[in-house]
Structure formats: C-alpha cells, structure tokens
Amino acid sequence: MTTALDTRRPGQTAEVPPPPASRRPRILQYNFLGGLTGWIWLVVVLVPIYWIVITSFKLQADYYATNPLVPSSPTLENYRFVLENHFVRYFFNSVIVTLGAVVPAIVVSFMAAYAIVRGSAGSRFLRSVNAIFLMGLAIPLQAVIIPVYLIIIKLQMYDTLGAIILPSIAFAIPLSVLVLSNFVRDIPKELFESMRMDGATEWGTLWRLALPLTRPALVTVTIYQGLQIWNGFLLPLILTQSPEQRTLPLALSAFQGQYNINIPAVLASVVLTTLPILTLYVIGRRQLLSGLTAGFGK
Amino acid sequence: MTIAPPVVRTAPPAASRGARSVSVSWMAWPALFAFTVFGIVPLFGVLVLSFSSWNGLSPNIPFTGLDSWRSVLNDPDLPHALWVTFLIMALSWLAQTPISILLGVFIASHQRYRNWLAVLYFVPLLLSQAAIAITYKALLDPNFGLGAGLGWGFLQQDWLGESKLAVGVVIFVVSWQWIPFHSLIYQGGIRQIPASMYEAAEIDGAGRVRKFFSITLPQLKYTIITSSTLMVVGSLTFFDLIYVLTAGGPGDATRALAVDMYQRGFKANLMGPASVIAVILVLVGLGLALLLRRLGGRDAAESQLEGA
C-alpha cells in the first residue's frame, strides 16, 4: 500500500549498499522529462515563497518603487504593524484551540483504538463502533456545518473558543482511531498475554504496554491533526463572530480585508502566522512528512 | 495461586472473551460520544433541516416540508454550482495527475539532491488555505501585484476579475498546494514496483518510454485510483481557498457547491435550501467515491481506509 512509513524502509536499505541502488530501474535515472518537471516545479514553488518573504521586509513606499523580485532596504516595520493588530492574541487563540482539541482527541481516539483491537473479537458493540468511525471518514465537515452551528447555539457556546474545539475533536477522531488501531493491532499477542498474567488491568496495559509501543504513530497522528486544526478556517468562520475569538487563519483573512492595499503588511502577516509551522518543519521534518500522509499509514 | 491458571482455563473461552470485551468496551465510549454528537447527529440533522425554513437566527425552526427542496431544484443556480464544481474537479484532476506522476517518478529515485527537492516541494502543504489564498490574491493583483511591479503585461491581467481566469487561478492554486502531496503518494507506489520487471523489459529491448507506459503506469493503477479518489472527493469540499480568493466570484464564476451552501445559509440566512445543498454534497461525494471504487474493483472497506 502507498505509505510514507512503509516506503522509507525499502528506501533506507537501498541507500546503504551500492549494488542494489544501481539496480534501481533505469527509468528513474536519466529521466529528462521528469528532471525538467522537477526543476520547473521547484521554481513554481519557491518563487511565490521568496516573493512573500522579501516583500514582507519592504516599506510600502519601496514596494511600489523597486523591482518586486529584488530585496531592498529591509525593515521590520510591517511586522511591528502586524503585531500591533492583535496577532499575539490570535496566535494564543490558535494555540489554545489546537492544544485543547488535539490532546483530548488523541487520548479518546487511542482509548477507542485499544478497545476496538482488544475487544472486537467478542463484542458486537465494538465492531459497530469501528464501522461507525469508518463511515465517519466519508463525512465532510462542510456538509454538516449547519447542524453543528445549531448544536453550538443550543449549547450556548457560540462565539467562544470552545465552539471551535468541540467539533474539531469530533472530526479528528475517525482518522486517528483508524491509524492508531492499525498500530495497536501490530503489538504481539504474547505481550498482552504476559501483562495479563502479571495481573495488569486493561487500563494499566493501555498505558504501560500499548502507549510506549505505539508512540511513533501517536506523534504522527498528533502532528497531522494539529496541523489540520491550526490551519482550520471553516469552524472559526461559522462558530465565532467577535474579533477577540479569531484564530490565525481567520485573522489573516480579516487583516487582508482591512489592509488589502498594504501588500507588504499582508505578506508579513502570512509569514508570521506560518513561522511556527515552518520552524516545526525544520525541526521534525520526518515526523511531519509522515504526519501529512497519516491517512495512508498502513 | 499456583492452582489458579487451570481453574481459569476450565471456563469456556467465549465467556472469558465476553468478560474481557466488557472490561474494554467503556474505553470506546468517550470517542463514540464525541463523534456522535458532532458527526452522526449533524449528518441526520442536515437532512431534517433540509425540510425546514430556518433562518439561522431565530430559536424556533419552522418545518415546511419539501419547500426548500422544490426551491433549490428549480433554481438555475444549482446546475451552475454543480457545473462549476465539476469543472474545478475535472480540470484540477487533469492538471495535477500528470505532473504528480512525473514528479513522483523524479523523487522516487534515491539521489540525495532529489530528497532535498522533495523537502522543498512540501512547504505549500504546511500553509493554511487562507494564507495561500491571501498570498495569491496579493501576488495576482493587477495594480499592486507581481505583474505590475515587473511590468510584465502577461502577469498584469485581471486574474480574479474575469470568470475564465478566476477558474484557472483556483485550479492553479489548488495544484500548487496539492501536487506535492500526490507526488508523495506516487513516489510510494513507484518504489514498490519490483526492479525485476524493468530488468525483464530491458532484456526484451524496451526503451524508457515503452517501460513507462508498459510497466510503470499499469503498475500504478491502484495508486492512481487512490490519488484520484482523494482529488475528486476532496475537490467537493474546497471552501477556504475559494472563499478567501474569490468568495465565489466574479459574479458566480467560482461558486462551487460548498461556497453556494455557505452563501445561501450564512449570508442569505436560508438554512433550509443550504441544507439541501449540503445533502446533495454528501450524495455526490458518496456517489463519486463508490464509482471510483467500482473502477478499481477493490474491496470496499480497503479503499475506504485509503480514501482517508
């Protein structure tokens, strides 16, 4: 199956001894068309990013007077302007929403994944739970946003950060359960057996056996869901109203609506809100990449 | 204590299994509860609301039978929204698939510099759709954008102000963000093709192009179906990007189903008709997923896992 996690293994073995590497299909080498596409795509990806970064350091007056692809007299003025527009607050809103949703989502998903793997054989209930989550994968958030909005109003949570957190938890669950249960299933039966012999409860086995053995998968799923929620736009747009409750993506869009002529400032806001994720990418590239394809894990 | 194990073993295995599943069942409850409240209930809720004429503000929800359905199905905006959705779906598939396969082939080989190129390719995937939309809105601005600054006439068009150009921009931006993701999927698929197949083809004197079309592409069949399912079903839910980039405009040129639903429900306060659109969205998504699954001839559950 197509998975970043699986493919790395053959990739690594092929890199170590030269003979297997040279036995790679020749189509993958001297591939003119592929190479051309590869380098052109690099330009397509990098030029806008380069333009965002250098422009965000230009004064608005310079921006109109200079070549847009050449950096000139760098200034932090735009960043100061963005920060003055409450972006620190929006940043913390995003942090609260992301942590507040990801942590509970992963904990309950992990518990459910454990229960499904350990109990499905003897429990029709757990088999139906599994089926419900599988079906849940096919429900797009956009399609159910109106009833979610109604429920949030009935819970009297409209225009709070909690209104974003609760549905975010729910929509992180199906995929997390699916990926985590695949990893819990890989734990050898004998280990569970010996835990039972030692008198451990299922709850104890969950934390002392399953948790350490599935840690890489937990990190991957956490990163994937964290990125989804950090970048989420629809829930904040629909479920909040006041500027104080904005998360970063919504704040970006509002900021641009207000200062759309001041392009350097708008781009500084883009850089600033992306910086945390880019930092994470530099630090934990491998985890993040496998996180991005978590849906294909196994 | 030493006598205990035999005593346990005398119990029928089914009973002990049953006892164990009771002792773990409760662990599934919190996840099930959360997903039921915000996933399952809304799924039925949207169907129920499609028979109402709720305005989204008042506390009481008047039920008016099939009125909303009748008004939406007779509205010429619906075929238009379906057409826009289909257009964006088909063109973004056409744009992304060949490039993703070529890039997948390119990054599937193990040279180090290609790994580093791949690292750079993935940066757009980390950005929020709102950030990407804002960037391109600024970049393509005919008066203040990159084209105006460089003085290149070609880049100075009113990209988001003309219907055809705006659809093209949406497709370009979608591809800009998602091609790396799909090329990663293809990279995985290509690396699993056995090298012996290529060796056998070489012995038979097959050239590179021949090998690509006779081995690589057929071997990628399931990868192509997986990637296409994600592209096609995912394109139904493009909302953030279109909303920030064009808000469905100019006019209604990029008003796809999800944007149409938002405009009806949360701008025009017509939650009944908006719910009808949402139901249509679910049905179209399920229909397409089933169709692609049929094409692949694969076990339903299995491709559902991949469809995640």
Image: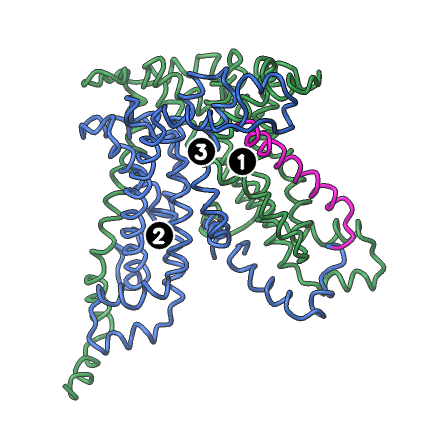
Q: Secondary structure at mark 3?
A: helix
Q: Amino acid at mark 2?
A: Val
For mark 1, give the secondary structure.
Answer: helix
User: Which amino acid, mark 1?
Assistant: Val
Q: Are marks 2 and 1 in contact (CB under 8 Å)?
A: no
Q: Could you tell me how far apart the alpha carbons at marks 3 and 1 are, in whole angstroms? A: 32 Å
For label 2, the residue is A177
Residue most toward the front? A73
Question: Residue drawn 40% across and 23% down?
Answer: B277
Q: Position of residue A4 (x, y in %)?
A: 53, 55
Neighbourhood count class around disc 2 (C-alpha, 10 Å): few under 14, some 14–19, many 20 upward = many
Residue B233 lies within the magenta run: no
Q: Colour of chain A?
A: blue
What x and y, as percent, mark residue B299?
49, 52
- Which kind of residue does numbered mark 3 sit on? Leu
Which quadrant of the figure has residue A238? top left
Which span is picked out in magenta? A29-56
In the image, residue A247 lies at what x, y percent? 34, 31
Q: Which residue is mark 3?
A: A272
**In the image, is B154 to the left or to the right of A75?**
right
Task: Return the chain for callout 3.
Answer: A
Q: Nearer the viewer, mark 2 or mark 3?
A: 3
Point out residue A14 in the picture as x, y percentages from the top left corner: 64, 66
